[in-house]
Image: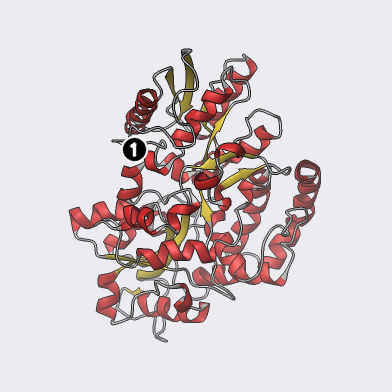
Amino acid sequence: MSNSRISRREFVKLAGVTVAAGALAACTPSTNASPTTGAPISGAKVRLRYAHWGNVDEKASTRATLDAFEKANPNITVEQIYIPDAGDPYLQKMTTMAASNTLPDAALFPDSYTLDWALKDQFLDLSDIFTGEHAKVDAISYKTPDGKTVGVAGAQEIALIWYNKDTFDKAKIPYPPATVDKAWAWDDFLNVAKQLTVDTKGKPASDPGFDPQNIDRFGFQMGLWDMPLFAIIRSNGGDVFSEDWHSLTLDSPEFYDALQQIADLMNTHHVKPAYTTSPGGIAAMSTDSALLSGKVAMAMDGQWVLETLNKVRKEQGLKFGIGVLPYLKKPVTAAVGGPIIAFKTTRHPVEAKQLVSFIMDPKQTPDYIHGGLWMPNEKRWYTQPDLLADCINNYNHPAEYKTAVVDYSLSSVTRPMPIYRVPGWPGMWQLLNPALEQIWLGKANPQQAIKAVLPQVTDYFEKSILALLK
């Protein structure tokens, strides 16, 4: 991911990357109805409309899932509304449909605006279809202040460390820990990152003669959007919001120290590519390209990259591994994903929820789960041995996956990202991001940068967010 300043449209894509990567459908989905829905509720013919974005492959796979739903529910037909562009163009289309009273019955929806639309009473409450064995992971559930679940991500995707095994082997350095009890403390991680960062003359960053102006390989890479930042900030005991989301907590030593530690990776230790607003360069390389090229030894990225890394492993021989994140005070990771919703304007609320339930059932997305793109969105898939084995006992899931991903997600996703609980979060992020940029560039320390925008951020929070949370 690029480290350049994130636009509103890019934020939408990043925050909802797991759904943007796939339209919540398997290429060869099961034809069984969701256990929460059973047989058709009546003999009457019902026609639903379902909207989504994505590329042409996602269009085809979505149609396959809708066909499977129709086969399981012969009294229901589903019209597919395909809108290629995500982000703002998609939202504009939804807004136009709302104004003309032509919204579909259900849809993939931009996660940045989910809670805002929910609080305008645009969505059905889906709480009743995500109970019992179909209870979803809380961290990826979009919940209104009164507790209604208005959407859930199609997959839980957590932040992890990905690394090139050959690079570690040649340096004779042990692989990153794959269990949370052995996770690197920050100083241990930094020591390894320095050993793996080398200049064009082969000197590591730990050597006094290291040349930071001519780096051949960086020890570490990470994006500077909210998911990875929150994982590190929360590992230091900091956060932007209080536990009940009703107050701001970013003006704290824990918050500032975490930001400084991240900035130091670039500006002091030189183990991470420097922040730049220019396109291209190592900082903009995808994780698979960065690891395969040998320009990066390890990268922090979401679980979704497993599918691509497996492809690169098969086609180009990349030997990669998975590790848990380093931590400042306690092990923490973060989870993201984007939602499927049902519009309240539907003439067929029962059937619309039936469709959402079907699409949101992990059994209907086996190819995405088996291939490594998605983690399941239901709690039971992480603890029931038969379901877990079906997910990970295959070539695409490395031996360390159980401890580095499954167990790690259960122990170290401490709370939801703001997008799942805070309406208006993208607007606040846009206020914070220029200040963060000054920190990454080394032009201001965290206290200076954040305190400079704190009055504006606080005013926005009190006027545009707090009133909606109470």
Horizontal placement of 70 versus 459: left or right? left
Residue at 53% over, 73% down? 327
Q: Badge 1, how many Cα within 10 Å: few under 14, some, many 20+?
A: many
In front: 140, or 32? 32
In front: 112, or 258? 112
Residue at 32% over, 81% down? 173
Up/down of 247 relative to 151, above or below: below
**Residue topped by disc 1:** 26
In this view of the protein, can residue 198 be seen by the observer? yes
Up/down of 407 relative to 422, above or below: below
In this view of the protein, can residue 89 be seen by the observer? no
The secondary structure type at the circle numbered 1 is: loop
In front: 201, or 165? 165
x%, y% of residue 313? Answer: 23, 57
In front: 233, or 276? 233
Q: How many marks?
A: 1
x%, y% of residue 189? Answer: 46, 77
Horizontal placement of 392 versus 46: left or right? left
Type of amino acid under label 1? Ala
Up/down of 252 relative to 377, above or below: below
Horizontal placement of 182 versus 259: left or right? left
Up/down of 81 relative to 238, above or below: above
